[in-house]
Image: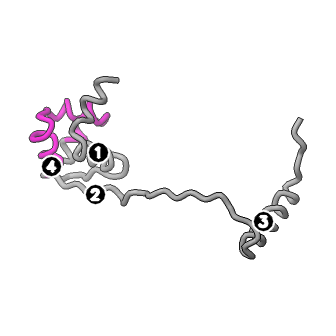
Amino acid sequence: MAKKVRMADGLLQGLKEAVAYERGEIQLKTSAREIPAPAPSWNATQVKKLRMQTYHMSQPQFALLLNVTTSTVRAWEQGQKRPSGSAARLLEIFMIDQGVLKKLTAV
């Protein structure tokens, strides 16, 4: 059975390790990850071009692909709304890798 550690003991141990690291007495395990920039902003023309010229899909088909409603795609393409957050990132992925559709249908 694992020994229970009081929170204060854990905090004290962490502080001791931080001081030892600052003094160069110990090395800590580190890792670095490169995080991409935020997804680009999409305008109506770009969304419509991706749908029609790259994927040759109707609005309902494209909506199903992106897991959004047809009215959402329509609003994007009419400039009433802009894709944001995960939708903008997903559109970016579909723009960068046109083979992603085949990858999704192969699953």
Q: Which residue is mark 4?
A: 78
Query: What is the distance, in whole Å, between disc 4 and disc 3 at their CAs?
Result: 57 Å
4 or 2: tag closer to the N-terminus: 2
Residue with the mark numbered 2: 40
Measured in 3D between alpha carbons, the distance from the residue under mark 1 to the one under mark 2, in whole angstroms, is 11 Å
Q: Residue lying furthest bottom in this view? A: 23
Mark 1–mark 3 Cα distance, whole angstroms, equals 42 Å
x, y (%) of residue 65?
26, 32
Quarter of the rendering containing residue 104: top left
Answer few, some or many: residues within 10 Å of disc 3's Cα (few below 14, many 20 plus, some between 14 and 19): some
The residue that label 3 is drawn on is 17
Q: Quick one: 33 or 74, which is closer to the camera? A: 33
Pick whichever of labels 4 and 1 is earlier in the sequence.
4
| Residue at (32, 55) in percent of width and height | 39
Residue bearing the label numbered 1:
93
Residue at image position (74%, 66%) is 26
Q: Position of residue 46 (x, y in %)?
A: 16, 51
Residue shown at 36%/60% (left/top)?
37
Magenta segment range? 46-73
Q: Is residue 76 magenta?
A: no
The answer to whether the residues at label 2 and label 3 have Cβ atoms under 8 Å apart is no
Q: State which mark lies toward you, 4 or 3.
A: 3
Q: Distance from label 4 to label 1 (Cα)?
A: 22 Å
Q: Is residue 66 magenta?
A: yes
Quarter holding residue 41: bottom left
Disc 1 residue type (three-letter): Ile
Amino acid type of disc 2? Answer: Pro
Amino acid type at image mark 4: Gln
- Comparing labels 1 and 3, the label whose residue is closer to the camera: 3
Q: Does label 1 or label 3 sit earlier along the sequence?
A: 3
- For disc 1, the neighbor class at 10 Å (few under 14, some 14 to 19, many from 20) is few
